[in-house]
Image (cartoon, rainbow, N blue to C red):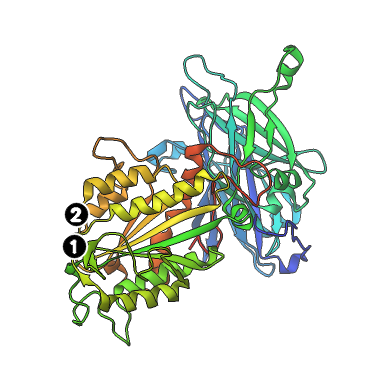
């Protein structure tokens, strides 16, 4: 939640200092431009700037509906001292063909000012075609809501189980709508999820909504949540509904569920229980506040292809005035992750070197040379261990990374087996070359994809990193040598050379960009919902990410 304390700051700011306004749009009696179906309307919002109309945003397309209520909320800056002209244009969308390409697509437009909408709070006006001609009986309604600068946002993620099947030859295509019930008992659409095709146990994408929109900053305000089976002709089948409040949502995070009820079935069917259940799942912040930790491991490539560390051309050369690429990548990523690890201790491993005392090649050794405890004190401790180990080892080869992936995976698996798992594991691999144990690495990644774990690979130097793109999985599903696909995409590869002249923040942003989604997929692959209090979540189930990690 936006405010960890659970309170909802929503001061009543005077109109003169209002900075933003949310606009909700609906239409009635739109013209029907389609021959076989009804129009598929979409609204464009334009604002006049220096005498020119500029598009600033557009709504979603609602299929086959002449009386649409758009879920899209337009947010505009509001200046009391200015006349801000707006124009709303409604079009019949034709998919990839775009909007406004033909006169026949135009369903009507309306002009007004931000001040008019703010003053009246609700504006209903007729839509006009070109040359001032009425668009039949078409009207557009704009409802405004004031946003104070700090009313906060809430991030929600819903899933459902065992919904009623409304389709004859396939399963239902469910979507969820949330309505706020106002003081006059009218309902305002707050959010409409995407449609999940052919699935009676859908998991809808997480979404953000302002507390003002959700509940007018009143925790006890009633909300109506409705589940529908999507129909391409606009005749959606009602599956069920439930009522709740934001206060109840806060208590229910990841634990409670709501019965999705069809009132008609409840009356007619003697043994009717529900038409499915809907669950509000944990957010990343819930887990962090509940004690979930990110365990960070760095693995450094000490193969001979890096060059002799005593030579200034080596990728491992320690320049007292300028950190090498290994150190830059380590510090950039590590400083973000360390905020989510309470003891600030990080495992630091090396591979591809001959190590003392026998100088045998190792692909899995602690760079502090303590086999019983490979952890270092903070990122600075990792840096110091790295610098001190370089003179003691002999760079060798080959570049085998499967042993380290498997080692971290074993730790993650052991943690999960305790049934009190409260850690998510991030393995940062820093390497200068092509992986030589590709088959074993693919197998290890497939195995790790079943665990709460992400792998970040930063390519250092100018080698050919083509194989790394395969491990990344962005260009296709990664498979084991036997053809087994990964359960979820857990690898992110980034070549450091693309960030040589960028700030450390830019590198960290890129390499950590996919971690939130990967953690979400961990929860989704399990369908686990923690039971009991928040402090001991069963498995990190993360649909969102704190602002400090969502770079």
Q: Is residue 473 left or right of residue 70?
A: left
Q: Is residue 475 left or right of residue 29?
A: left
Q: Is residue 267 above or below residue 211?
A: above
Q: Quadrant of residue 269?
A: top right
Q: Quadrant of residue 497?
A: bottom left
Position of the N terminus, as image quadrant, is bottom right
Mark 2 touches mark 1? (CB < 8 Å):
yes
Q: Position of residue 79 (x, y in %)?
A: 66, 67
Q: Position of residue 2 (x, y in %)?
A: 65, 58
Local secondary structure at mark 1: loop
Q: Which mark is residue 397?
A: 1
Residue 106 in view here: no
Count neighbours of disc 2 (C-alpha within 10 A) and say few if under 14, some if 14 to 19, many if 20 or more: some
The residue where tag 2 is placed is 436
> Can you name the residue that lies furthest to the front here?
358
Q: Is residue 106 above or below residue 373?
A: above
Count neighbours of disc 1 (C-alpha within 10 A) and say few if under 14, some if 14 to 19, many if 20 or more: some
- Cα–Cα span, label 2 and label 1: 9 Å
Q: Position of residue 545 (x, y in %)?
A: 54, 56
First-in-chain label (2 vs 1): 1
Relative depth, front residue between 416 and 171: 416
Q: Is residue 65 left or right of residue 390?
A: right
Q: Quadrant of residue 387?
A: bottom left
Q: How many numbered marks have been drawn onto this rendered protein structure?
A: 2
């Amino acid at each position: 939640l936006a405010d960890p304390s659970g309170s909802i700051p929503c001061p009543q700011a005077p109109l003169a200092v209002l900075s933003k306004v949310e606009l909700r749009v609906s239409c009635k009696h739109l013209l029907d431009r389609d021959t076989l179906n009804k129009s598929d309307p979409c609204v464009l919002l334009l604002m006049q700037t220096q005498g020119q109309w500029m598009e600033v945003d557009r709504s979603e397309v609602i299929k086959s509906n002449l009386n649409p209520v758009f879920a899209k909320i337009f947010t505009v800056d509001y200046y009391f001292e200015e006349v801000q002209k707006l124009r709303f244009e409604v079009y019949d969308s034709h998919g990839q063909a775009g909007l406004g390409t033909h006169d026949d697509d135009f369903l009507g437009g309306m002009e007004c000012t931000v001040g008019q909408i703010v003053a009246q709070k609700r504006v209903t006006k007729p839509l006009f075609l070109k040359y001032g001609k009425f668009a039949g009986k078409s009207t557009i309604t704009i409802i405004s809501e004031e946003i104070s600068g700090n009313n906060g946002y809430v991030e929600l993620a819903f899933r459902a189980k065992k919904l009623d099947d409304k389709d004859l030859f396939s399963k239902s295509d469910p979507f969820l709508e949330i309505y706020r019930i106002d003081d006059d008992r009218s309902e305002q659409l707050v959010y409409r999820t995407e449609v999940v095709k052919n699935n009676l146990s859908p998991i809808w994408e997480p979404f953000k909504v302002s507390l003002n929109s959700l509940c007018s900053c009143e925790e006890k305000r009633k909300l109506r949540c409705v589940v529908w089976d999507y129909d391409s002709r606009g005749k959606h089948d009602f599956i069920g509904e439930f009522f709740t409040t934001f206060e109840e949502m806060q208590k229910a995070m990841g634990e409670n569920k709501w019965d999705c009820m069809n009132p008609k079935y409840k009356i007619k069917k003697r043994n009717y229980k529900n038409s499915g259940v809907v669950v509000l799942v944990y957010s990343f912040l819930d887990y962090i506040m509940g004690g979930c930790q990110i365990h960070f491991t760095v693995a450094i490539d000490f193969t001979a292809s890096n060059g002799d560390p005593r030579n200034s051309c080596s990728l491992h050369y320690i320049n007292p005035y300028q950190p090498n690429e290994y150190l830059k990548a380590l510090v950039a990523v590590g400083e973000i992750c360390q905020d989510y690890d309470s003891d600030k201790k990080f495992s630091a491993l090396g591979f591809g070197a001959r190590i003392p005392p026998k100088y045998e090649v190792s692909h899995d050794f602690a760079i502090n040379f303590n086999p019983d405890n490979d952890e270092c004190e903070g990122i600075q401790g990792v840096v110091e261990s790295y610098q001190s180990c370089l003179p003691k080892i002999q760079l060798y080869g080959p570049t085998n990374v499967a042993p380290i992936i498997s080692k971290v995976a074993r730790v993650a698996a052991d943690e999960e087996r305790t049934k009190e798992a409260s850690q998510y594991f991030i393995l940062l691999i820093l390497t200068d070359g092509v992986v030589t144990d590709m088959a074993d690495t693919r197998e290890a990644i497939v195995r790790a994809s079943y665990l709460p774990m992400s792998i970040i690979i930063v390519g250092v130097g100018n080698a050919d990193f083509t194989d790394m793109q395969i491990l990344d999985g962005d260009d296709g599903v990664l498979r084991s040598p036997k053809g087994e696909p990964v359960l979820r995409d857990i690898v992110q590869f980034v070549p450091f050379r693309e960030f040589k002249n960028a700030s450390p923040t830019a590198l960290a942003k890129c390499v950590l960009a996919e971690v939130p989604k990967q953690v979400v997929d961990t929860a989704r692959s399990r369908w686990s919902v923690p039971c009991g209090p928040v402090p001991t979540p069963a498995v990190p189930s993360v649909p969102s990410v704190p602002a400090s990690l969502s770079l």
